[in-house]
Image: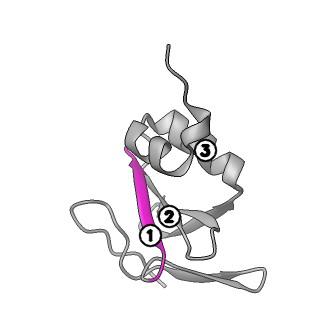
Amino acid sequence: MIVVLNQKGVGTLARRIIEGKLYDTNTAVFVSKHHSLCRCLYVTQKGSWFTTGSTGTDPAIQEVLTADQANKWLLSSGDGDALKKYFPDSIENA
């Protein structure tokens, strides 16, 4: 299934089954967009993390991440608001 990106970069039609689990941008929560990677991060209602992005002309669900990988993804994206919301223990004051 193809991802259709709106102005916020949120996929509206991506759905993929990976290892018997359904990853669907229609039911998952959009977390953040990594502009330099052209990817978006989502979390499912059960706490599974995945990214969407584009490979050439075929945008789709790219990969499933662990919570630790999602935390690192957000750190590299620089999205402090999402880090504070989803991984508050990973940030400390300077």
Pick the front one: 51 or 29: 29
* Residue shown at the point (41%, 75%) measured from the top left: 3
Answer few, some or many: residues within 10 Å of disc 1's Cα (few below 14, many 20 plus, some between 14 and 19). some
Q: Would you say the magenta stretch is mainly helix, strand or loop?
A: strand
Between discs 1 and 3, the one toward the N terminus = 1
Figure label count = 3
Residue 49 position in % (x across, y down): 61, 63
Q: Is residue 23 magenta?
A: no
Please rate how many residues cluster around mark 2, counting C-alpha atoms within 10 Å: few if below 14, some from 14 to 19, many from 20: many
In the image, is 75 to the left or to the right of 31? right
- Where is residue 34 shown, x and y percent of the image? 42, 46
In this view of the protein, which residue sits in the foreground, 35 or 45? 45
For the residues labelled 1 and 3, the Cα–Cα distance comes to: 15 Å
Please tell me which residue is depicted at 47% across the width and 79% down the height of the picture: 14
Which SS class for mark 3? Answer: helix
90, above or below 86, in the image: above
Instruction: Give the extent of the magenta segment.
Output: 27-35
Q: CA distance from mark 2 to mark 1?
A: 5 Å
Task: Specify the quadrant of the image occupied by residue 2.
Answer: bottom left
Q: Secondary structure at mark 1?
A: strand
- The amino acid type found where label 3 is placed reads Asn
Q: Label 2 amino acid?
A: Tyr
Residue 35 placement, left or right of 20? left
Q: Residue at x 52, y 42 (%)?
A: 74
Identify residue for label 3. Answer: 71
Residue 83 % position (x, y): 49, 42
- Which residue is label 2 attached to? 42
Residue ID for mark 1: 29
Q: Which mark is residue 87?
A: none
User: How far is mark 3 from mark 2, CA to CA?
Assistant: 12 Å
Asked whether the beta carbons under mark 1 and mark 3 sit within 8 Å of each other, the answer is: no
Q: Amino acid at mark 1?
A: Val
